[in-house]
Image (spheres, helix red, strand yellow):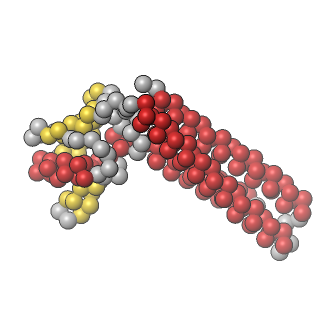
Amino acid sequence: MEALFDKTKSKMEKCLDSLERDYKAIRAGRANPSVLDRISVDYYGCPTPINQMAAISAPEARMLLIQPWDQSTLKDIERAINTSDLGINPSNDGKVIRLVFPALNEERRKELVKDVSKRCEEAKVAIRNIRRDAMDELKKMKKSSEITEDDQKNGEEKLQKITDSYTKQAEEIGSAKEKEIITI
């Protein structure tokens, strides 16, 4: 039964990791190198993430500096950023690419907060689905007489406590991101 709990915790942990990755990709008015994680550049016929082709730094709060290791890829990186859904025009000075993030207006902040809360809710639903699968597993174990009815009840209570804990963590992650977006 402990193996079931460990497996459940592991799956719920992956849900939280996925939520955090999603949140890192959300542009909150502050320059964050992880917004470039989803953008790939065609490098010698192979799609390659920008962070594997260049040094990315944030010299200012709203600017990213991309310095390619191979200067011949500068135009390719610029093109990939332009065609992405990032919504920022890169400026290229021949050696580095600068991405200047505009300040978010109130309307865009509200949209982002809605998106954050929607993704948080999706993560909580995924966590509850994992709990449901674990509960089904407990029922199967009871049916095949691997565990007693008391063990099943105790297991269900423990699963609920685990679920509550991970749901609370998802809410905390979501409210921290909302606070980051709302803060000017």
Assign the N terminus to one quadrant of the image. bottom right
Image position, residue 46 (x, y; %):
24, 63
Is 2 displayed left or right of 182 in the figure? right
Tag count: 0
Is 2 displayed left or right of 9 in the figure? right
Assign the C terminus to one quadrant of the image. top left
Q: Is residue 43 visible?
A: yes
Is 153 displayed left or right of 74 in the figure? right
The quarter of the picture where residue 40 lies is: bottom left
Q: Residue at x 19, y 47 (%)?
A: 78
Image position, residue 146 (x, y; %):
83, 70
Q: Nearer the viewer, residue 22 or 121?
A: 121
Q: Is residue 120 above or below residue 135?
A: above
Q: Residue at x 55, y 42 (%)?
A: 117
Q: Is residue 24 above or below residue 129?
A: above
Q: Residue furthest bottom?
A: 144
Q: Residue at x 33, y 40 (%)?
A: 33
Q: Nearer the viewer, residue 1 or 167?
A: 167
Image position, residue 131 (x, y; %):
70, 57
Q: Residue at x 78, y 64 (%)?
A: 138
Image position, residue 30 (x, y; %):
37, 32
